[in-house]
Image: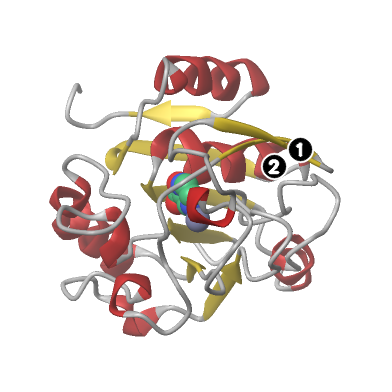
Amino acid sequence: MADEALVVIDLQNDFCPGGALAVAGGDEIVPLVNDLIRHADHVVLTQDWHPAGHSSFASSHPGSQPFTMIDMPYGQQTLWPDHCIQGSLGSDFHSGLAWTKAELVIRKGFRPAIDSYSAFFENDRTTPTGLAAYLRERGIDTLTLVGLATDFCVAFSALDAVKHGFKTTVRLDACRGIDLNGSLDAMLKRMRDAGVTLEDHVLD
Ligand code: VGL
Ligand code: ZN
């Protein structure tokens, strides 16, 4: 329907096998995501888009290892391997993704000092990306989210989407997770509790 949009989160080379922050099976979802794109009226993509030396990279914090936590002025932040550096091959969308139909690409994580998991807010939870206003102005009130990673950028986007009043579904069969220290189960529960509809058509 005209008031619905498909939001494809971070389906980029660095989150697929062979990439700098590979999510297991990340590339497997491409055919299904393409199917969903084909059937969607409106498509929005997000693109993780970091400058070199970004503060979310472990390499920017001497002595720190990837996948550990650090205190940032805005709160706790997981440190990652260098990934999705602006303009790099790793930041490109997966070459099999049918992205041409997308009406908007939201880039996030471009501020050197703040990471951004959500398509709506950066990790300080207050700096908006502009997506909510864009969707609202266009009369879109219903979202389906797919992409990578289930327990980080997809989950934070879905939680913010319901916070903004969007009717929000996550298609788990079109997502793959990182699962760091139980993050997948924790974020599935947080999404369920917040009122996100979780659908898994593989299990249907
Ligand atoms: C993501 C970690 C760092 C994601 C992005 O897309 O889930 N995860 N940057
Ligand atoms: Zn990132």
Query: Would residue 104 be visible to someone looking at this image?
Result: yes
Instruction: Tell me where residue 188 appears, x and y as whole percent.
Output: 47, 21
Along the line of sight, which residue is nearer the eye, 192 or 136? 192
Q: Quadrant of the C terminus?
A: top left
The amino acid marked with disc number 1 is Lys
| Residue at the image point whose x is 63% and y is 41% from the top | 167
Residue at left 84%, top 43%?
Answer: 73
**C-alpha gap between disc 1 and disc 2:** 5 Å
Is there CB contact under 8 Å for labels 1 and 2? yes
Residue occupying image coordinates x 27% and y 43%: 23
Residue 163 is tagged as: 1
Q: Secondary structure at mark 1?
A: helix
Q: Position of residue 137 (x, y in %)?
A: 78, 72
Classify 10 Å Cα crowding around label 2: few (below 14), some (14-19), many (20 and above).
Answer: many
Looking at the picture, tell me which residue is in the foreground, 10 or 52. Answer: 52
Is residue 84 or residue 132 the one in the foreground?
84
Q: Is residue 39 above or below residue 191?
A: below
x, y percent for residue 168 = 57, 40
Q: Is residue 144 visible?
A: no
Q: Which residue is mark 2?
A: 160
| Mark 1 close to ligand 1, CB under 8 Å | no
The residue sitting at 42% across, 84% down in the picture is 87
Eyeballing the image, is 199 above or below 161? above
How crowded pointer 1 is (Cα within 10 Å; few <14, some 14-19, many 20+) is rated as: some
Amino acid carrying mark 2 in the image: Asp
| In the image: residue 104, left or right of residue 30 | right
